[in-house]
Image (cartoon, rainbow, N blue to C red):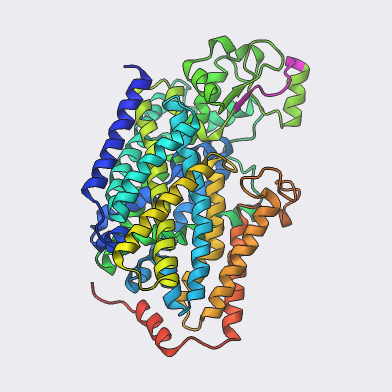
Amino acid sequence: MDLKLLTFIVVGATFALYIGIAIWARASSTSEFYVAGKGVNPIANGMATAADWMSAASFISMAGLIAFMGFDASVYLMGWTGGYVLMAMLLAPYLRKFGKFTVPEFIGDRFYSRTARLVAIICLLVMSITYVVGQMRGVGIAFSRFLEVDIAVGLAAGMTIVFIYAVLGGMKGITYTQIAQYVVLIFAYTVPAVFISLQLTGMPLPQIGLGSTVVGTDGVYLLDKLNQVIADIGFPAYTDRNTFSTLNMVLLTLALMIGTAGLPHVIIRFFTVPRVRDARKSAFWALFFIALLYTTAPAVGAMAIYNLVKTVQPGEVGHPEGSLLHEERPRWMHTWEATGLLEFKDHNEDGRIQYYNDKNPEFSAMATEEYGWQGSELRVDRDIMVLANPEIAGLPNWVIALVAAGGIAAALSTAAGLLLAISSAISHDLLKGIIMPKISEKRELMAGRISMVAAILLAGYLGLNPPGFAAEVVALAFGLAASSLFPVLMLGIFSKRMNSAGAIAGMLTGLISTLLYIFIYKGWFFLPGTNVFPDNADYWLLGISPQSFGAIGAALNFAVAIAVSRVTAPPPAHIQELVESVRVPRAG
């Protein structure tokens, strides 16, 4: 069957499933809209949490980072998975025990202040809007390639699907839809990985295949072979650290970890289970379901870049006669070139595709002098590697169509969770909590749906003009969550002395300092050229990248919050007793 038709059928079937679930699980009350009535089974909630957390950055972009960065990309694996462990151990059970619908509601009640709640709403909106941009970018990339439509059309289709199941079903519909999306995305991620691992190493488990020998190489291990292949075209060893300084690696890992732990759209998932004990079980199951993808990602990245280089260099790697003739390029290169995410320019007009590291002065000088090369002629957007991987490996069309459905499911699942967090912040926290406290449940539910429609339209518009590839945008969002929300949540749970003045001062310090740093080096997200300094390590303060600065913002937040709370009045006695009671274990 034709790939385009098969992709329409597979993706269309998954969309029909999502919409059917939304109709079946339609929310009829604010409790069902915000927290699914607090009646979700822990295993089901763990699966939904995994889908909510594993966004387009995890499915589409992370393996692309690993493919092009090698060992250095382990910072994303360590940061994101480590952060989830922090959330599960230090935040989720206590916040569930507190029993509120949203993170701003917890902050407002814990710090006995509408102002604290308002600042938390602002922090949540800034972080969530930044995060959702990367998800809409993922939707656009998947649609534009596999359905062969313009990225704007792809975004419109994705917005429509999210509109139906998120606005109609709320958290109840989103939860059960995300369970279906997890099943789709994990099959879509692991099935091609198994096929490719078998092709290259004869080992069906990609996690083991990554450390196995390559078929037909007389016992050469895959990573050793990959080091050799990319060294032959001027790139540093795949298994060496090449990109990050030690300081940046530590700070980025920390920013991603505490940013993950401070994500409000994931934290709210632990409010959907009946009991505190179920929140802990949900955390365990979510980590298990997340690990299925995250332990596969290193193999997917390594095998993808290996197959790409061997496709472009079918003969002797690193020599002109070994390069692929442009007119003989495979079909997948034609189709990805049409999207603009893969680009070939024949600088020396020899009809061959020269792909090498022209930023390596020694190799570039040698290639120019001996081969007459005039710069690398292939540009590959790293966000396409997972989606293109089964095509590069020549897998069956049904596998390629499955990957398309998985990429879209990953982006839509997180986008829905983020949009619900944005909606609840506006309708429940801002409108009911501050502006109109006597609003009826029916009107609040309507306001929630209207605010979600507005959030979907804004996310779609911003998704057309992203500031970078998916994982880069998401890393910035995690930095904002790390610097603004994580410290105040931790101090709210574990410090009886922390008061409203300290919480407000800390959140504002962390958020503003991180936003200013991002603005200085990256500019306003959607206005190119507005950055004050170039975005490269030569200009960064102490060599700290904008993606890593969230850890510094968090440290400033902690320091200011603690200092201000020490020189101002302590919280009322009933608040201190409340904090103590939240930390005391109880049955059930």
- Classify residue 397 as left or right of residue 369: left
Placement of 558 over or under 26, stated as above or below: below
Estimate the x, y position of residue 385 in percent, counting from the top left: 50, 32
Q: Main secondary structure of the magenta part?
A: loop
Residue 213 visible in the shown view: no
Residue 154 image point, x, y percent:
44, 33
- Position of residue 73 relative to residue 566, above or below, is above
**Quadrant of the drawing holding the N terminus:** top left
Q: Is residue 372 magenta?
A: yes
Measured from the top left, where is residue 493 in percent x and y?
43, 75
**Residue 39 lies in what quarter of the image?**
bottom left
Q: Which residues are magenta?
A: 370-379
**Residue 147 part of the magenta-drawn span:** no
State the residue lying farthest toward the left: 24
Residue displayed at 55% across by 24% down: 309
Instruction: Tell me the residue at 47%/35% (across/down).
Output: 140
User: Observer-nearest residue: 354 or 125?
Assistant: 125
Q: Which quadrant of the figure has residue 45?
A: bottom left
The reply, left or right, for residue 302 in relation to residue 539 is left
Give x and y (percent) for residue 480.
56, 58
Residue placed most toward the observer, 266 or 439: 439
Identified at 53% across, 46% down, the residue is 74
Image quarter in which the C terminus is found: bottom left
In this rendering, the count of numbered labels is 0
The residue that appears at 38% across and 50% down in the rendered structure is 52
* Residue closest to the eye, 363 or 579: 579
Q: Is residue 577 above or below residue 293?
A: below
Residue 186 visible from this viewpoint: yes
